[in-house]
């Protein structure tokens, strides 16, 4: 989905001046009067990493912003910052304009694009160093991945490992939330040896009776480790799916695509979710698929995203009617994360 917003002549002039002056570190860009407008450029204060904290001066609470950064004299980075607590309209507007910004200024000029939802992802030198290490696939002599992690980051790394294990079908493990989570070959059933997570009866009924255009959403009660029914909305158009899904807590959703016999499994896990939530959901998402299949659903189409905004109408359409050269079956269709 594109917003139709284009770069102003002022932005083109500012960008030309920015690219011609190696002393300039960052060019902030915002959306004003339905066009992309530049803000004053930010000069370097030493190296790239020592200049990163200066970006704090242009960030405002709940306000999205584009940042064009000079990582080195010949390397530009386009960063889109959309705070997790920004308004829905602002989130949608900036998310749907980021591709246009890079395209109009010249995609060949940018080495990479990055999407950030937390202020720390923009202004932290440590985060940038870690991002660069991951992007280059190497570790420098002075900084290793372990050196760059604090306690919270180690917890997040554990979440990523749990997600990778779930994605590749490896066995689950105790994640410190009071229960044992394992990969199963059976079905969800309270008290079952294979599935030690109870499922409320209304969950099973909602899945068994899902209708054309209906969106059924499930959550996990972290305290009791019970699968709960969040909602079963009828007559939901593909354009409205994202707005129905929580942007603050993980969700498992089952969407009966209108006018078809396809039910799409959707897993979302916002960056603002708690560590326990993220680990619990990451470790059990394949079991959520098994749950749906045990209630008679054929879940060949699966999408996952870190934010509901990624679950667009076009993405759903692509899953239901994929291009011929991609074939009819796909695994978890995770949108490619910018800057990785």
Image (cartoon, helix red, strand yellow):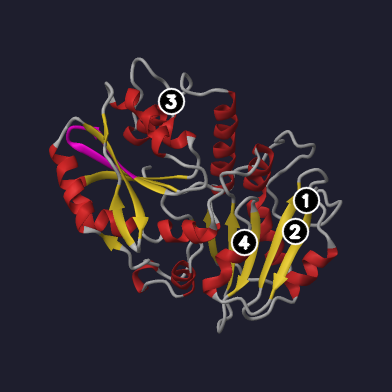
**Marking on residue 187:** 2
Give the Cα separation between the discs numbered 2 and 4.
Answer: 25 Å
Comes first in the chain, label 3 or label 2:
3
Residue contact at pointers 1 and 3, CB within 8 angstroms: no
In x, y percent, where is residue 262?
57, 75
Residue contact at pointers 1 and 4, CB within 8 angstroms: no
Residue contact at pointers 1 and 2, CB within 8 angstroms: yes
Give the Cα separation between the discs numbered 3 and 2.
Answer: 43 Å
Residue wearing tag 4:
245
Q: Nearer the viewer, mark 3 or mark 2?
A: 3
Dot 4 alpha-carbon crowd within 10 angstroms: few under 14, some 14 to 19, many 20 or more? many
Dot 3 alpha-carbon crowd within 10 angstroms: few under 14, some 14 to 19, many 20 or more? some
In x, y percent, where is residue 30?
35, 51
Give the Cα separation between the discs numbered 4 and 3.
Answer: 32 Å
Question: For this rendering, which residue is in front, 54 or 185?
Answer: 54
Dot 1 alpha-carbon crowd within 10 angstroms: few under 14, some 14 to 19, many 20 or more? many
Question: For this rendering, which residue is in front, 153 or 21?
Answer: 21
What range is drawn magenta here?
67-77
């Amino acid at each position: 989905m594109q917003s139709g917003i284009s770069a102003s002549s002022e932005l083109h002039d500012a960008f030309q001046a920015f690219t011609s002056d190696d002393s300039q570190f960052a060019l902030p860009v915002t959306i004003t009067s339905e066009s992309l407008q530049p803000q004053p450029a930010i000069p370097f204060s030493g190296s790239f990493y020592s200049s990163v904290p200066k970006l704090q001066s242009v960030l405002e609470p709940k306000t999205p912003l584009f940042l064009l950064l000079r990582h080195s004299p010949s390397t530009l980075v386009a960063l889109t910052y959309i705070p997790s607590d920004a308004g829905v309209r602002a989130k949608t507007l900036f998310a749907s304009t980021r591709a246009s910004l890079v395209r109009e200024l010249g995609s060949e000029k940018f080495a990479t694009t990055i999407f950030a939802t937390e202020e720390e992802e923009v202004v932290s030198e440590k985060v940038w160093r870690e991002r660069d290490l991951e992007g280059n696939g190497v570790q420098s002599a002075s900084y290793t991945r372990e050196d760059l992690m604090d306690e919270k980051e180690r917890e997040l790394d554990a979440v990523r490992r749990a997600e990778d294990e779930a994605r590749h079908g490896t066995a689950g493990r105790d994640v410190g939330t009071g229960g044992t989570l394992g990969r199963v070959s059976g079905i969800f059933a309270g008290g079952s040896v294979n599935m030690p997570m109870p499922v409320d009866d209304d969950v099973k009924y909602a899945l068994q009776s899902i209708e054309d255009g209906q969106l059924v959403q499930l959550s996990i009660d972290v305290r009791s480790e019970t699968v709960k029914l969040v909602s079963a909305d009828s007559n939901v158009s593909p354009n409205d799916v994202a707005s129905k899904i929580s942007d603050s807590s993980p969700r498992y959703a089952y969407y009966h695509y209108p006018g078809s016999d396809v039910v799409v499994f959707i897993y979302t896990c916002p960056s603002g979710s708690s560590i326990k939530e993220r680990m619990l959901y990451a470790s059990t998402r394949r079991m959520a698929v098994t749950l749906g299949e045990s209630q008679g659903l054929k879940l060949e189409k699966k999408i996952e995203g870190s934010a509901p905004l990624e679950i667009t109408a076009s993405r759903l359409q692509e899953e239901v009617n994929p291009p011929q050269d991609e074939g009819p079956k796909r695994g978890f269709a995770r949108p490619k994360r910018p800057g990785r």
